Each structure stands twice: as structure tokens, then as C-alpha cells.
Amino acid sequence: MSSLKINAGNPISVLSRLLDRLTIDRIPQVKNGKRVPDSLPRGSYKFIPNNLVAVFNQFELIHTFMGYRPTDLKFIDVGCGIGNIMLIAQAYFYTVHGIELEPTYIKLAREILSIKKNTNKTAIFKQDILNFKDYRKYDIIYYYCPFEDPVQQKILELKIEDKTKVGAIILPFLKQSSAIIKDSRFERFGNIGYRKVST
Ligand SMILES: C[S@@+](CC[C@H](N)C(=O)[O-])C[C@H]1O[C@@H](n2cnc3c(N)ncnc32)[C@H](O)[C@@H]1O
């Protein structure tokens, strides 16, 4: 599996930097006298954007190597923050959902993605990712280390690995648990993720 080569000066890099600037600079630091974020549980990371070029690379690879139309796939960002990754995912997948707890991020994500109310196609669920019940509905499950606390991060990863349906691909960034490497239910998907092959 080859990888798309993206250098610092090329258009995707430039667009990624522009998107970061247009979105991240809009996150308020204080709201109603309280610092943002103020509603995340202990052990959670606040919003830290992933490297958009790396994510573009992953989506391009999925687009190239999946044996069926990638647009039919259902994508979810676990801890979606301001919707930066969802925005890119919309160019690749028909259904794009996110889960997030912090209202300030959700409000901004809804603006950026023009989501007035949740639909089957585009939705943000205000929920704790550890309590989310529907991981089995998705074909592509993406996360960028929502928990600073490695114990909680591992719990999340194992839960997703358990609930994911056969055929689904997990795209983990900064993975903490290595159990998936020896888990016979999974095989490597290129060098970017894991595909579930059995229950
Ligand atoms: C490191 S940021 C990743 C943002 C984005 N997904 C990306 O890749 O650029 C992690 C996000 O997870 C959210 N998060 C952390 N703990 C959470 C929890 N228990 N339930 C829901 N969202 C959570 C944070 O608010 C934050 O927006």
C-alpha cells in the first residue's frame, strides 16, 4: 500500500493550515466567566487538533484501497471537538458523525459544518464517548487520543475494539493499548489502522 506524499508547500498542506487558522482561532477561551472547556471529565484532553495532512493521507488511502464505494461508508470521530476532522471526512464519506461533550466545541462544530439539527447524514452527539452505545453502526471509527489519562484511553480503545462490527476499520492516533496487535479478530489495514475480520 503506497502512501500519498504531501510536502510542506503543496496545496493540501496550505489548505490544512488555512483551515486550522479559520477554525481554531474561533474557540473562545472564556465563556460565561468560565474557562473553556469546563465540562470535560477528569482525565480528558481538551481540544487539540490532529495534523490534518496526516488525516487527509489516511482518507485518501481508504478511498484508494477499499473494495467498495467509499462514499457509502459511515464515519465517526470519537471526541470530534470543533468538527475539523468531520469537515474533511465529508469529502470522503456519505455519513459523518461525531461525539463530543464540551458544549462550546459542539456549538462551533455545528456552525462550521452547518448542522442545524442532527440527520442520518451529519450529526454530533453530546455524549461521553465511554457511554456511547452505537459504535457497531460505523465503518470507519477515528479517534485522536481523547484521554490524557492512559487508563481511560485504554478502556475506550478496548470498548471500541469489542463493539466494532466485522469489516469496520479503526483509525487510531496515539493509541495506548497494544492488545489489538495480538487480537485475532483484527488485521492491519495498511500502516494506518486495523480492520475487524471476525467476531
Ligand atoms: C485531542 S482532541 C481531538 C479533536 C479532533 N478529533 C481531532 O482529531 O483533531 C480530543 C477531543 O475529545 C473530546 N473528549 C475528551 N474526553 C471526552 C469524553 N469523555 N466524551 C466526549 N468527548 C471527549 C475533547 O473535548 C476534545 O475535543
Image (spheres, helix red, strand yellow):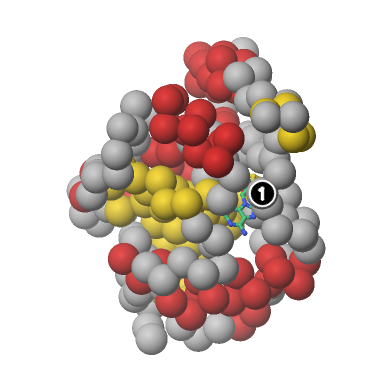
Image check: 151 left or right of 93? Answer: right
Residue 144 visible to an observer of this rendering: yes
**Residue 113: image location, x then y, percent:** 38, 29
Residue 180 vertical placement versus 171 (above, below): below
Horizontal placement of 118 versus 181: left or right?
left
Residue 86 image-quadrant placement: top left
Foreground of the two, 187 or 150: 150
Figure check: 130 above or below 125: below
Q: Residue sitting at 34 percent across and 75 percent down? A: 166
Position of residue 128 measured from the top left corner of the image (x, y, whole percent):
55, 61
Q: Which residue corresponds to the image point at 27% horizontal and 52% vertical from the top-left? A: 73
Image point 67% across, 61% down: which residue?
175
In the image, residue 29 above or below residue 103: above
The answer as to whether callout 1 falls within 8 Å of ligand 1 is no
Q: Nearer the viewer, residue 101 or 194?
A: 101
Looking at the image, residue 19 sits to the left or right of residue 38; the answer is left
Residue 42 is drawn in which quadrant?
Answer: bottom right
Residue 118: percent from left, percent from top: 30, 44
Could you tell me which secondary element the residue under label 1 belongs to?
loop
For the C terminus, which image quadrant?
bottom left
Residue, x 48% and y 80% (percent of image)? Answer: 162
Q: Is residue 102 left or right of residue 83?
A: right
Disc 1 marks which amino acid? Ser
Q: Is residue 10 visible in this depiction of the protein? A: no
Looking at the rendering, which quadrant does residue 33 occupy?
top right
Residue holding disc 1: 39
Numbered marks: total = 1
